[in-house]
Image: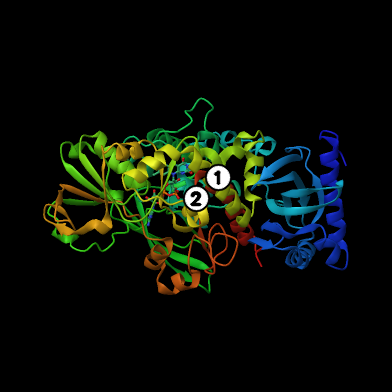
């Protein structure tokens, strides 16, 4: 084994573990295999051995499952990967470990993984694994055509009177004579990442979006928007943002990049096209879907797969607020709000204190409106810098983006939780002055269930926090008013009548009350039966993975992708590989 490029002891220790691991996989009983893991260890598999995304906890449970799945997949050749980050000592979720990236293969594909070994008192002998990740990178015979194996492009030039590149692209995107294998609904980062991956796997894919132009999902957001985390964490697959770009990308710059990305990655996109719903034909294993185009025409297509990449923008949540219908002014949902200019010199009530509520309140305030935020429930507030950037520290540690992504996926849910409790405590300390100020003016704060912070609020309920870019200071200084929803008696034509008898006058009420969950959208687009079959989407149930996300769902041919830029970049790869495997008849 060539490990000389690594600090010898760590590399040797990690390779020793991999050798023992491979021997134990081949041994007839589970005892030796279980003894390679600490009792409360974890194994996460991303397709490589199971064609599933799953996490198993505890060495007695891991050993039989791993032996069975590794044998079935014919896994072998576990070895440190000299082309990737060398084994290192790291601290993850507050625990010191040796972290090593390795590679292996199965009958079906090639994979990579991460093992985290806990140091023991006797040096490196007999180290045991705390976490193990096995992840599929490619299906044999169907590798992406990248770098040295890129297409030559000469086919477009050989036949001078035949179709050139543009003719071919135009015909491919028109779908006049065929239907795609996959329809991706939504051209935000989730849809673009999924379609780019599928394209590289030679799967005929059409993205539809109801917006007029690619990028409009960002263009239509408020004037001052810049992304909340930094550029180096947010790259899309294959085409990283230029190194000259600002750390926090402004929305219109991002929108233009999305359009350029779709063009450069040769994605077939139909904008101004609403996905109006579909029915699954079990016998033919195909969907019938209706696409409504902005010119008033409709097209029925029969793809084998639908990838829902509709984000949170599906169905606005308009809670039944008693008496709101009495209000004589304008009522907008946050999704309908675009610009504060029209409200200069007017009075606005913003109901809701998540990111949208704060951002819209700040936009209205900057536009010269008199604004009051109505807080309905407690909210987590985190300064955008440095506190909100703490979870991305890994991406500053030095390893390549590819290695950071693999390391990120190798942290099982319970350890991610533990890690976020620590980060939340750290953020709380850093933001103490601001949080004290907010508490003084009566803002109700929380720090997530069990102190797990904003990331788990995002993963479980998709909101309930605010990355402070200045609105919190405006609230503390009284520049933006704050009232509690519970103190409102009801709404009257002029505004909100408070329990004390006073009325807060308003010309505009913005409902920053979020969006309904994906399950509601599924019911609307595919009917009750499919919605019941699929069940809850996003958040965690009993399993240690997000529900129905990036993975096979109980409804054949229906897939979901959502999340941050990093989640979409990382998991679009595995979504693409599963759909490819399904097309090849490899998914049992
Ligand atoms: C101020 C702000 C800053 C943010 N900063 C970051 C950041 O730094 N990093 C990060 O990772 N995330 C950030 N986010 C969060 C998140 O990444 C975005 O909300 C993102 O838009 C989600 O992408 P998506 O592709 O899942 O969905 P969306 O961007 O909502 O795209 C979904 C698309 O689906 C289309 N669609 C929906 N239904 C249909 C239908 N039936 N037919 C056709 N089309 C349909 C919509 O038109 C839309 O274009 C930020 C959000 C905000 C508001």
Q: Disc 1 versus disc 2: distance between alpha carbons?
A: 8 Å
Give coordinates of residue 175: x percent, y percent.
45, 52
Q: Determine crowd level at label 2: few under 14, some 14-19, many 20+ residues with C-alpha closer than 10 A.
A: many
For residue 57, side relative to residue 276 (left or right): right
Q: Residue at x 69, y 52 (%)?
A: 135
Q: Label 1, on which residue? A: 423
Q: Nearer the viewer, residue 112 or 371?
A: 371
Residue 167 appears anywhere in the view? no
Give the residue number, with chain letter if any, for mark 2: 453
Q: Quadrant of the C terminus?
A: bottom right
Taking the image as drawn, is residue 269 in sight?
yes
Q: How many numbered dots are placed on residues in this image?
A: 2
**Residue 281 point in image, percent of width and height:** 48, 71
- The answer to whether residue 61 is above or below residue 496 is below
Is the Cβ of the residue at disc 1 closer than 8 Å to that at disc 2? Answer: yes
Q: Earlier in the sequence, mark 1 or mark 2?
A: 1
Could you tell me which secondary element the residue under label 2 belongs to? Answer: helix
Residue at the spot 81% in from the left edge and 35% down from the top edge: 6
Where is 582 relative to 441, above or below? below
Between 325 and 517, the one nearer to me in the picture:
325
**Depth order, front residue of 263/41:** 41
Q: 580 and 573: which one is in front?
A: 573
Q: Residue 27: where, in percent of width, then height?
A: 88, 64
**Residue 97, horizontal then vertical, whole percent:** 73, 45
How is the rendered protein coloured?
Answer: rainbow
Q: Decide if ligand 1 comes within 8 Å of the CB at mark 1.
A: no
């Amino acid at each position: 084994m060539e490990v000389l490029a690594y600090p010898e002891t760590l590399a040797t220790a990690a390779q020793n573990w991999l050798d023992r691991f491979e021997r134990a996989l081949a041994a007839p009983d589970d005892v030796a295999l279980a003894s390679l893991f600490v009792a409360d260890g974890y194994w996460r598999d991303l397709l490589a051995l199971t064609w599933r995304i799953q996490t198993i906890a505890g060495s007695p449970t891991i050993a039989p499952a791993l032996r069975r799945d590794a044998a079935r997949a014919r896994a072998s050749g576990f070895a440190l990967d000299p082309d990737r980050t060398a084994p290192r000592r790291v601290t993850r979720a507050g625990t010191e470990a040796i972290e090593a990236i390795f590679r292996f293969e199965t009958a079906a594909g090639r994979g990579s993984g991460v093992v985290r070994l806990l140091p023991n008192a006797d040096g490196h002998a007999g180290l045991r694994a705390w976490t193990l990740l096995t992840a599929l990178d490619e299906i044999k015979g169907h590798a992406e055509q990248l770098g040295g194996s890129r297409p030559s492009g000469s086919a477009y030039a050989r036949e001078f009177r035949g179709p050139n590149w543009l003719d071919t692209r135009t015909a491919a995107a028109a779908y006049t004579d065929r239907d795609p294998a996959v329809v991706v609904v939504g051209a935000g980062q989730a849809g673009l990442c999924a379609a780019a991956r599928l394209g590289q796997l030679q799967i005929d894919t059409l993205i539809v979006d109801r917006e007029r132009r690619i990028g409009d999902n960002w263009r239509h957001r408020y004037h001052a928007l810049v992304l909340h985390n930094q550029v180096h964490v947010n790259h899309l697959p294959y085409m990283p943002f230029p190194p000259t770009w600002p750390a926090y990308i402004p929305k219109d710059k991002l929108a233009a990049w999305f359009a350029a990305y779709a063009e450069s990655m040769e994605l077939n996109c139909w904008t101004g096209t609403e996905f109006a719903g579909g029915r699954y034909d079990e016998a033919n294993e195909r969907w019938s879907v209706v696409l409504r185009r902005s010119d008033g025409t409709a097209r029925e297509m029969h793809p084998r797969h639908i990838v829902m990449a509709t984000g949170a923008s599906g169905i606005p949540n308009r809670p039944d607020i008693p008496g709101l219908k009495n209000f004589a002014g304008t009522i907008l949902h946050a999704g309908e709000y675009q610009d504060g200019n029209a409200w200069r010199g007017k009075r606005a009530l913003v109901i809701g204190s998540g990111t949208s509520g704060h951002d819209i309140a700040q936009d209205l305030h900057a536009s010269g409106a008199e604004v009051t935020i109505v807080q309905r429930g407690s909210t987590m507030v985190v300064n955008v810098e440095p506190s909100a950037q703490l979870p991305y520290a890994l991406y500053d540690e030095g390893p390549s983006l590819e290695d950071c992504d693999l390391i990120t996926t190798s942290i099982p849910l319970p350890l991610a939780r533990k890690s976020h409790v620590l980060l939340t405590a750290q953020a709380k300390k850093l933001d103490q002055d601001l949080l004290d100020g907010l508490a003084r003016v009566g803002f109700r704060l929380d720090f997530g269930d069990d102190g797990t912070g904003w990331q788990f609020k995002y993963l479980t309920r998709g909101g309930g926090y605010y990355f402070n870019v200045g609105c919190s200071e405006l609230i503390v200084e009284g520049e933006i008013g704050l009232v509690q929803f519970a103190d409102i008696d009801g709404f009257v034509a002029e505004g909100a009548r408070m329990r004390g008898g006073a009325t807060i006058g308003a010309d505009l009420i913005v409902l920053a009350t979020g969006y309904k969950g994906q399950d509601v959208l599924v019911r609307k687009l595919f009917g009750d039966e499919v919605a019941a079959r699929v069940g809850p989407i996003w958040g965690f149930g009993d399993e240690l993975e997000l529900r129905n996300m990036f993975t096979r769902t109980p409804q054949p041919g229906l897939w979901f992708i959502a999340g941050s830029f990093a989640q979409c970049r990382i998991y679009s790869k595995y979504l693409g590989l599963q759909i490819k495997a399904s097309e090849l008849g490899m998914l049992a």
